[in-house]
Amino acid sequence: MRRVALGGVAGGLPGVLIVFVPLLLHGAGLITSDQSQVGFIGIPVAFTGAFIGGLGGAAGTPLAGRVALGLILGLGGGIAGGVGLTLVLRSAGVSVPGLWLFLAFPAMIAGGVIAAWSGPRAGTAPPREPAEVV
C-alpha cells in the first residue's frame, strides 16, 4: 500500500510542479499570462505519472490489475466529487478555480491505495479446500 502511494506521488510530482510553478510565477508578476500557459502541459503529465507510479509501486505483486482499476475509479470519483463541490461552492457565492482538478489527483492515489489495501495481504494463505476422503 505504501509503495503504491509513494509511487503515485513520485510519479505525479513533476506534473504538479509543471502546473503550479508557472502559476506562482505569474501570481508574483514575474512572467506574463501568455508565459504561464505552459503550465497546462503539467495536467496530463501529473495524471499519467501518478498512474504509472502507482502501478510501479504494485509491480511484482498480484495487485497490479486491482490497483490500476482503483487508480482509474479514484480519478473518476475525484473529478465527480470536485465538480460537485465546485457547484455547491458556486451556489454559495464562492469561486475556487481548478478545485475539481486539484481534488482528482489525491483521489486517484487514494483509489489505488484502497484497492491495494482491499487485496490479499502478504503472509495470508489462500483458503484451503477440504481434503478428499478415499
Image: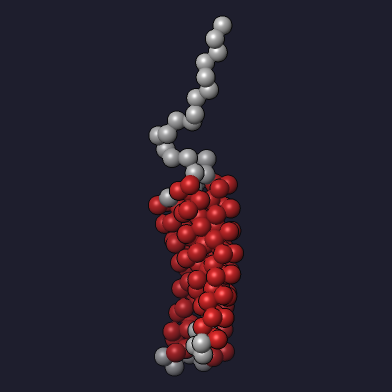
- The way the protein has been coloured in the rendering is secondary structure
Image coords of residue 14 (percent x, y): 47, 68
Tell me what residue is drawn at x 50 percent, y 25 percent: 128
Identify which residue, 76 or 94, lies in the foreground: 94
Tell me what residue is drawn at x 44 percent, y 61 percent: 10
Image coords of residue 39 (percent x, y): 53, 79
Residue 14's place in the image compared with 73, above or below, is below
Q: Quadrant of the C terminus?
A: top right
Q: How many marks?
A: 0
* Viewer can see residue 49: no
Tell me what residue is drawn at x 42 percent, y 38 percent: 122
Determine which quarter of the picture holds residue 33.
bottom right
Image coords of residue 87 (percent x, y): 57, 81
Identify which residue, 128 or 116, lies in the foreground: 128
Tell me what residue is drawn at x 53 percent, y 76 percent: 85
Image coords of residue 107 (percent x, y): 50, 64
* Viewer can see residue 123: yes
Residue 114's place in the image compared with 82, above or below, is above
